[in-house]
Structure formats: structure tokens, C-alpha cells
Image: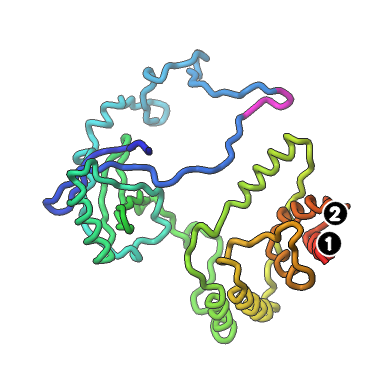
Amino acid sequence: MARAIWSGVLTFGLVTVPVQLFTATEDHTTHFRQLQRGTSDRIRYQRVNERTGKEVDYEDIVKGYDLDGDYVVIEPEELDEIAPGKSQVVEITGFVDLEQVEPVYFDRTYYLAPKGEEYAKVYELLRAAMEKENKTGIATFVMRGKQYLVALRAQEDVMVLHTLHWADEVRDPHQELPALPERGQTKGKELDTARQLIGALSIDWRPENYRDTYEERVQELVDAKAKGREIVSEEAPPEATNVIDLMDALQRSVEQGRKQRKRPSGGRGKVKRLPTGERKAGKGAKDQLEQLSKGDLYEQATKLDIPGRSKMNKNQLINALTKAAS
């Protein structure tokens, strides 16, 4: 059971419901410890006074704002005292269409739950009303010494709270980026074909069809090094499309996208591997192999003990596996 990271009240109009905030996501990244090269000695960081070199206890640390070398010292409780409004209140000030909030403003996602069963009816009333109206509540609240701008959205059974960036935290792309194309530069047959490509690649959103293949490769690397095995590196990214070849690349992409939609694969983004000993011979097997990454192909080649596999590129691995399947 997850633990609440914040508790308070949610208000909309004159209606108030006690709520709790829970983290909605978790990190699956492989975490490494820092060691000194050539040893198993851990590297640790300490809070050290840069003048005396002595370690400082956490409770003896205060905040200081630098004014040209002179510091204005702020105590933690002083920040709590000036928290805007009531720090335990999420106050909805208005409702907007979710499409109006540009993705660049979204930061973190949390689940918002009623604090007890006795508050479930009021909570569900707001969730259901927001769902029916397809609206998102905009609010502010204070958590851990910081004020947040948030968007509250109704999902099927729960309300979700997204923390948002403030307007002055979002950079203007026209000022920050070195070059942006002018609108209206693309039109005619190229634009029509690009739209066909989007249509050919349009799918239903199924997040379970996707997996973190880089994290899988990190785990394979750790496992291989622990067992003294070699691991094959991935191929370099493809070269940029030449403007002269753009139309041809678009047309071929449309055909490829249509073939992928016809292929019964259980959803795009999740590719079935060929079971060992049951691989189909001929073009069908090659088509399925082409959907795999170089790492997956190397894994299949290792199971079949194909000689010279560590020096093969992706196409050579596909050819070798197709030959073995035949």
C-alpha cells in the first residue's frame, strides 16, 4: 500500500473534501553506485563547510540568498510562515478544456484520493461532474515549501493531479532555438503523402505494448559482464533523409505502414519473437526478423550458436537466422 506524500483539502466553490496525494509513477531505471576505478570503494558525498572542511549536521543548515557576496539568511520556518494562502488547501479557481493546456507545461503526475470513506461521495461527485463536462480543474497549493500550479483531471475511477510549470518557466522556442521553419513551406503532394503516412501509422494507444528496450539492454550488459560474456553493440542511427529523396521515402513509408497494420501482431510497438525450434522458413520468417532490434537478433543467434555472430551487422544476422530457420 502506497503512503500519502501530502494531505489537505480540495475546494471547488463552497464545497470542501479532505484528500490525500499519492505518487502515480515509479522509476524502473537501473541504479548504479559510484566507485573509485580499480576498487570496490564507494564514493560518498558529505555536507562540508568549505572554510573549515568539517562536516555539518543537517539541522545546522539554513538557506542563504547571495547579494554580491553578502548573504540574506532565511530559516526554514520563515518560509513556512509566508506560504501563500493555506498550505493544506488545493483550491480550484476555474475549469478549462484539457486541450488548452500545452504538453510543455506538464511536469509530474499524482493520484488524488479521498482521505476517508466518509468523503468518498463528495469526491466522486466532483470526479463524475468533471468527466461528464470533459473539463480540467486549475488550482494552486503548497507542498514541501513550494507552491505549485496544478491541473486536476478525472479518470475512470480516480482524480489525477498534474503539477504544471509556471508561465515564466517555459522558454519561448522562437527565442531559444537556432532555426525554425516558416509555416506554409510544405504543401501539395508531399504534404498529402505525409498525411497518408500518419493515417497508415495511426493506432490505438495501448501503453502495455511498449517497453523500455534501453533498460533491457542495460540489464543484459550487467548480466553479460557478470558472467564474462560479450555483448553486441547497437547500430548507429540512420542518416537524415535527403530532400531530393523525400517523396520516394514518404511513399515507401506509407506502403510499409499499411503492411504493418495488416500484419496481426497484437498491436504495433510490441513485436513477437520467433520461438526457438518453431521459426517459419522463407520470407515470412525474414519479415518477422526485420522487426527485431539488433540486440534481439543477436540473442536469437546466440541461442542457435551461429558462428561469427558478434561481428555481424543487422542484415547479416537476419540472413544467418533466416538460413538457420530454413
Between 73 and 230, which is closer to the camera in this rendering?
A: 230
Quadrant assignment for the N terminus = top left
Q: Position of residue 155 (x, y in %)?
A: 33, 57
- Residue 183 lies left or right of residue 21; in this view the side is right
Tally the marks: 2
Is residue 226 depicted above or below 136 in this figure?
A: above
* Residue at position x 71%, y 23% in the image: 39
Residue range in magenta is 34-39
CA–CA distance in space, label 2 to label 1: 8 Å
* Residue receiving disc 1: 324
Q: Position of residue 29 (x, y in %)?
A: 56, 42
Which color scheme is applied?
rainbow
Whether the residues at callouts 2 and 1 have beta carbons within 8 Å, the answer is yes
Q: What amino acid is at disc 2?
A: Ile
Is residue 173 depicted above or below 62 in this figure?
A: below
* Residue at position x 55%, y 83% in the image: 192
> Predominant secondary structure in magenta?
loop
Q: What amino acid is at disc 1?
A: Ala
126 part of magenta stretch: no
- Residue 22 lies left or right of residue 256; in this view the side is left
Q: Which mark is residue 306?
A: 2
Mark 1 falls on what kind of element? helix
* Residue at position x 77%, y 60% in the image: 314
